[in-house]
Amino acid sequence: MPDQSPAQIAACTANAKVVEVGLQAYMAIKGAYPSPPSPWSAATYAANYEPLTAASEGGPFIPKAPPTTSYVIEYDSAGHVWVAPPGAYGPYDRGQDIDAVPAICDAAVG
C-alpha cells in the first residue's frame, strides 16, 4: 500500500462531502440530481463536473472539480458519491460509496 498522509485522506473526505452538499443543493433547486454528461474517464472528469461548477441556473454548486492526483471522486444521477484510487474511473460501486463506507478514502488515497 502506498504511503498515505493524513492530510490527503482528510482532503479526500472533505472533497467527497463538498460534492455531496453540492448535489443536495442542486437537487433542492432543480428537483433532480445532475447527470454526468459522459461516462467517467480521465478525459471527461472535469467536464462531468460542469453541471455542478457552472455559474448558471443557481450554480455554481461546488467551486471546482475535485483533484485526481491522490483519489478520484465521482457522482451519478441518483445522488451517489463514490471514491476510487487515482486513475480509476467507472460506474457506481456501493463498495466505494462515501456514505456506505465512510473510511473509503483510507483505501482509495494513493
Image: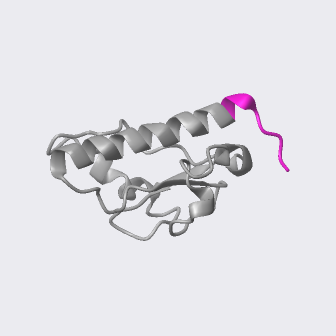
Q: Is residue 5 magenta?
A: yes
Q: Is residue 5 above or below residue 82?
A: above
Q: Is residue 50 above or below residue 21?
A: below
Q: Is residue 51 magenta?
A: no
86 sits left or right of 33 in the view: right
Which image quadrant for residue 86?
bottom right
Q: Residue at x 67, y 35 (%)?
A: 8
75 sits left or right of 50 in the view: right
31 sits left or right of 75 in the view: left
- Chief SS of the magenta region: loop
Q: Position of residue 50 (x, y in %)?
A: 31, 52
81 sits left or right of 3 in the view: left
Q: Residue at x 43, y 71 (%)?
A: 39
Q: Residue at x 38, y 55 (%)?
A: 79
Q: Position of residue 31 (x, y in %)?
A: 18, 53
Is there any visible trace of residue 70 in the rendered image? no
Start-end of magenta stretch:
1-8
Q: Position of residue 1 (x, y in %)?
A: 85, 50
Toward the viewer: 5 or 104? Answer: 104
Is there any visible trace of residue 92 in the rendered image? yes
